[in-house]
């Protein structure tokens, strides 16, 4: 089995892919499902998400827009909630809700885009974070045929230390599950994992971790640093819905 770690998404995956956006999309996605959400839809744009919420322009008898009864929208730009969305992208906020019977439609700056890049090559796409690291490693090992690719979403097309650190944590779990031939990206992630201190130190020192702290969202950084708290692993269907949403 081969292990590859891409420090930023660039496509061309053929087997099993773990997409990581620790701060905060994949951490929040895991939390949505932990809190009872039936499914996630990851859209390619905020407008597609809003179209799904308002049932693509359907109208009620009085001509009012018809809201989809079970869709809730979560996402951010610049770390802050998108106008018209029901939630931002805070895992701490998500952990306080009950999403039973709901489908969460997500669109974020980096995380959902990275998932779309991975899915376009027809791979099995799983969402990973520190919070579900061990379960994600086990699931990927069970599903992969020849190669596991760990894809770090980064932030604004720049490498994110928090994602590479999480890739190193997951790579360590995978090495404990069996022999792997690792690429240089995996070796970088493993080296970072072994040198950057504990998870909270690593996440707090990252550029995006510091940005979130400045936005008053430091609780999300501390939440995202909890390693293997969850056994939930979101697995995305590779095909895209007519609305361009992954589910
Ligand atoms: C993203 O998906 O770009 C990140 O999660 C941004 C954020 O939520 O702060």
Image (cartoon, rainbow, N blue to C red):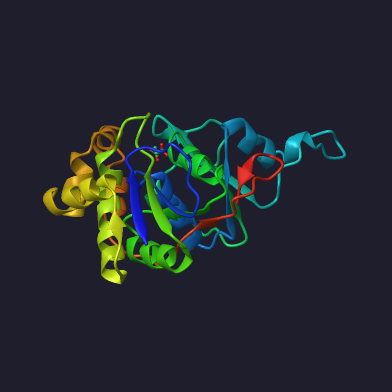
Query: What residue is rendered at 50% in x and 60% in y?
Result: 33
In the depicted view, which residue is nearer to us: 173 or 22?
A: 173
Taking the view exactly as shown, the residue that stands out farthest to the right is 61
From the image, which quarter does the N terminus lie in?
bottom left
Q: Is residue 238 left or right of residue 148?
A: right
The x, y position of residue 149, in whole percent, is: 40, 51
Q: How many marks?
A: 0
- In this rendered view, identify the residue nearer to me: 174 or 116: 174
Vertical position of residue 182 compared to residue 49: above or below: below
Q: Is residue 157 visible?
A: yes
Ligand 1 lies in quarter: top left
- Can residue 96 be spotted in the picture? no
Residue 110 in picture, x, y percent from top left: 43, 36
Pick the front one: 115 or 101: 115
- Which residue is drawn at the image coordinates 36% and 37% (left, top)? 8
Which quadrant would residue 90 be assigned to in this image? top left
Q: Position of residue 167 (x, y in %)?
A: 30, 51
Q: Position of residue 177 (x, y in %)?
A: 31, 70
Image height check: is 48 above or below 174?
above
Which residue corresponds to the image point at 74% horizontal and 36% vertical from the top-left? 56
Quick check: 125 left or right of 70? Answer: left
Tell me the quarter of the picture where residue 96 sits.
bottom left
Q: Nearer the viewer, residue 141 or 136?
A: 141
Residue at 33% across, 65% down? 134
């Amino acid at each position: 089995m081969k292990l590859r770690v891409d420090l930023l998404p660039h496509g061309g995956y053929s087997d099993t892919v773990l997409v990581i956006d620790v701060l905060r999309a994949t951490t929040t996605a895991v939390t949505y499902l932990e809190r009872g959400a039936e499914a996630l839809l990851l859209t390619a744009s905020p407008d597609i998400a809003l179209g799904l919420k308002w049932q693509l322009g359907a109208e009620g008898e009085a001509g009012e827009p018809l809201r989809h009864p079970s869709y809730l929208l979560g996402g951010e730009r610049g770390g802050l909630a998108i106008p018209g969305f029901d939630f931002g992208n805070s895992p701490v906020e998500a952990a306080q809700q009950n999403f039973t019977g709901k489908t969460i439609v997500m669109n974020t700056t980096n995380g959902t885009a990275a998932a779309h890049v991975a899915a376009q090559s027809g791979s099995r796409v799983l969402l990973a974070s520190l919070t579900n690291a061990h379960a994600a490693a086990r699931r990927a090992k069970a599903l992969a045929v020849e190669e596991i690719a760990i894809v770090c979403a980064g932030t604004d097309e720049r490498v994110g230390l928090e994602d590479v650190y999480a890739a190193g944590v997951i790579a360590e779990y995978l090495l404990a599950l069996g022999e792997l031939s690792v690429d240089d990206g995996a070796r970088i992630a493993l080296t970072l994992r072994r040198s950057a201190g504990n998870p909270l130190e690593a996440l707090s020192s990252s550029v995006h971790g510091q940005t979130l702290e400045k936005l008053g969202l430091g609780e999300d950084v501390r939440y995202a640093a909890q390693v293997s708290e969850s056994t939930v692993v979101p697995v995305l269907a590779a095909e895209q819905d007519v609305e361009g949403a992954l589910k």
